[in-house]
Amino acid sequence: MVYSPFLYNFFTFTAYTLGGEVGRVDAINNSQVFLIIMAEYFILKHKDYIFKKLLAAAIAFTGVLVLGFL
């Protein structure tokens, strides 16, 4: 877990260096919300506002798909 911020920054910078568009790379980076919601639900057993969280994740996922096909 110590290397997590390093890897995150490394892959983000690599994506920018290889010609990735800032908006698309940032949207993909922010898609980590899916993993956070899943971990919160299954590991931590937090079920407060789960519908709102899943709705927000679905909207973010749709945004990533739209950016991917444009």
Image (cartoon, rainbow, N blue to C red):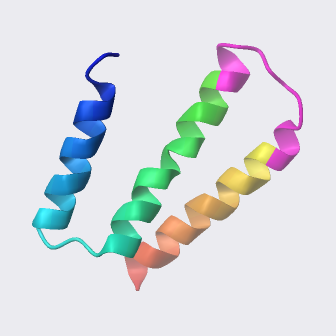
Q: Quadrant of the C terminus?
A: bottom left
- Is 64 left, or right, of 9 in this rendering? right
The percent position of residue 31, horizontal first and vertical second, equals: 50, 51
Residue positioned 20% across, 65% down in the render? 16
- Is 52 left, or right, of 42 in this rendering? right
Q: Residue furthest left?
A: 18
- Is 1 left, or right, of 30 in this rendering? left
Q: Nearer the viewer, residue 15 or 38?
A: 15
Relative to 22, residue 70 above or below: below
Image-quadrant location for residue 21? bottom left
- Is 65 left, or right, of 19 in this rendering? right
Q: Nearer the viewer, residue 34 or 21?
A: 21
Query: Is 44 in the magenta?
Result: yes
**Residue range corresponding to the magenta coloring:** 40-52
Residue positioned 33% across, 72% down in the render? 22
Q: Quadrant of the N terminus?
A: top left
Q: Residue furthest bottom?
A: 70
Query: Is 50 in the magenta?
Result: yes
Relative to 49, residue 66 above or below: below
Residue positioned 77% across, 54% down in the render? 55
Q: Nearer the viewer, residue 11 or 69?
A: 11
Residue positioned 84% across, 48% down in the render? 52
Number of numbered discs visible in the structure rendering: 0
Image-quadrant location for residue 51? top right
